[in-house]
Image (spheres, rainbow, N blue to C red):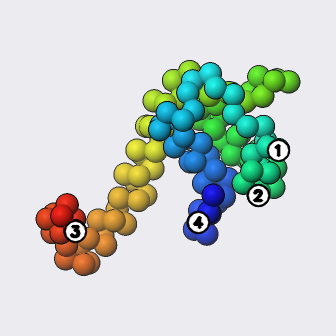
Amino acid sequence: MEFNQNKPIYLQIADGISEKILSGELKEGDRILSVRELGGELGVNPNTAMRSYEKLTMDGIIYNQRGIGYFVSEGARKIALEKMRTDFLENELPLILRKIQLLELKADDILNP
């Protein structure tokens, strides 16, 4: 995974897990990598991986079964979809729309590049 310098790594990791849920790669009830496994796989400090899991847990996307590991929550897809839509509409889309306006692009330019 390549990280963007403009967003904290733990949030990018959380987004990556949410994307796996949205794509169907991870399903409700699936066990996900341990904090150490995730840190090792991505080459990040386990504390960074833990922060990602804490955020996803607070959002209700994953849950921890003490002594067993982390799992995808029931309804995680719906929660992840809503959170990612909101983030896109509030943070990414305004930047895209501004760029479209600055470049004087028309709908046809975008839909038929």
Q: Earlier in the sequence, mark 2 or mark 4?
A: 4
In the rendered image, the vertical position of residue 71 relative to residue 16, given as above or below: above
User: Residue at 69% of width from left, 28% of height from top?
Assistant: 31
Q: CA distance from mark 2 to mark 4?
A: 15 Å
Label 3: element kind: loop
User: Residue at 29% of width from left, 65% of height from top?
Assistant: 97
Q: Earlier in the sequence, mark 3 or mark 2?
A: 2
User: Disc 4 vs disc 3: which is toward the camera?
Assistant: 3
Q: Which residue is mark 4?
A: 4
**Residue 93, visible in the rendered structure:** yes
User: Disc 1 vs disc 4: which is toward the camera?
Assistant: 1
**Closer to the camera in the image, 28 or 50:** 28
Along the horizontal axis of the image, is 41 left or right of 24? Answer: right
Q: Quadrant of the C terminus?
A: bottom left
User: Disc 1 vs disc 3: which is toward the camera?
Assistant: 3
Q: Which residue is mark 2?
A: 43
Q: Earlier in the sequence, mark 1 or mark 3?
A: 1
The x and y percentages for residue 77 are 49, 31
